[in-house]
Image: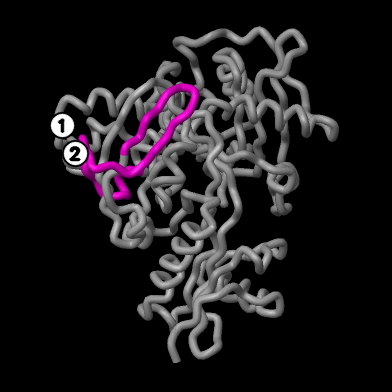
Amino acid sequence: MELEIRKAKPEEMDEFRRVAGTALLMPIPDFLSDDITLCAFKDGKLATSYAAWNLTVKANGNDVPVAGVTMVGTLPVYRRLGCLRKITTRHFELLHEKGEQPVAALYASRAAIYRRYAYSVVVTRHIYKVEPRYIQFIAGKEPKGSFREAGENDTDTLAILYDRFIADRTGYLLRNTDMWKRRLNPTPREGHQQSIVIYEEDGEPLGYVIYSASMAQDGRLKFGQNISIRDMVWLTPSAYRAIWEFFSLMDIILEITWGEAPTDDPLPHLLMEPRMLNELSHDGVLARIVDVERAMDKRGYDTEGILTFRIIDKLCPWNEGTWKLETSPDGATIKRTDEEPQLEMPVSTLALLYFGQVSATEAARMGRLDVHEPGSIASWDSVMGTRYRPGCADMF
């Protein structure tokens, strides 16, 4: 019997959670709806789980609908049968047919799995592990405000601060009510305590940090707490410095971990001894342009320009061909053209440019695209530039 690709039925969701949980070695939430699934069935049995959230991501200030692929897993006895490829191909076809979500994105246990389907790493995660004694600033705006604990009535304040923070950024998700509920009320973990504090100057909220504390031991006699930063927002340089100084004054803390620092995070350039951040980096969000025509005009652009480019995309043939993109701060249009392209690239490279992960110049130096009109590179760098480097503070 051939593989059947379809949504899981409501009565099959327990099996969906079992398959996903077995493959991913993690509990699968009950709130997952069967309506967002697309699975592979072998001989009537669920072989591969797959789902996609309806998300919205910021792209240089604009809102872009995204299919947030999640809960992907294949039971060991069904691996190497092409289950995931058939699901992914069908999912891309459905996205193109509906025309609502021109971009797909995900977090991967192994990036190589999804590079086969032309996903690219568009957000790099930077991780800090720093002892409070090394949070000593050589530069930055000195804070003049104070902190207060967030209360039950501060949900709107936190949401407003977050929306202001991501307004001009790229890669960050718009959070709906359910996303905020899960962030503010995480599943309890033994020995962990979550706290939320808001930073204000003259009564105006300018930032917040959500963190969890857990008991830790350093050596036989030294006990204290480890802090894990779960979410951090700042609207001014002084608010950013204030948040870090807030932690540096807690003598009981042994180590502070922040796993979602964006690539252009300022901390390494502000500390006396930046190497003590023990910074690590690895792939974060991977994204794929599923529908070039519907994606390119939704992104924000800060300059006027005319770009022509040829796309190579064997998995999504509707993307293949030469396109002409005209941009301005007021909007953009895209259409097919018979003109000679300035650049030629696989669709995986286009995702890197779309999110501002690399510039066209950098992509050319890497061999990720071919330049047919050398003088056009400067225009590409200008038009496709983003106000901030891409980042994302949410898992999905």
In the rendered image, the vertical position of residue 58 relative to residue 157, given as above or below: below
Q: Residue furthest right?
A: 153
- Residue 341 drawn in magenta: yes
In the rendered image, the vertical position of residue 79 relative to residue 374, given as above or below: below
- Could you tell me which secondary element the residue under label 2 belongs to? loop
In the rendered image, the vertical position of residue 341 relative to residue 318, given as above or below: above
Q: Residue at x 48, y 14 (%)?
A: 137
Q: Residue 300 at what x, y percent from top left?
A: 47, 30
Give the residue pinned by disc 1. 373
- Could you tell me which secondary element the residue under label 1 belongs to? loop
The quarter of the rendered structure image containing the N terminus is bottom left
| Cα–Cα gap, marks 1 and 2 | 9 Å
The span picked out in magenta is: 324-350
Q: Residue 297 at what x, y percent from top left?
A: 45, 37
Between 279 and 130, the residue placed more toward the observer is 279
Q: Is residue 256 left or right of residue 116?
A: right
Give the residue type that dot 2 points to.
Glu
Give the residue pinned by disc 2. 340
Q: Is residue 61 left or right of residue 186?
A: left
Q: Earlier in the sequence, mark 1 or mark 2?
A: 2
Q: Residue at x 66, y 7 (%)?
A: 144
- Residue 93 drawn in magenta: no
User: Quick check: marks 1 and 2 in contact, CB under 8 Å?
Assistant: yes
Q: Residue 105 at what x, y percent from top left?
A: 47, 51
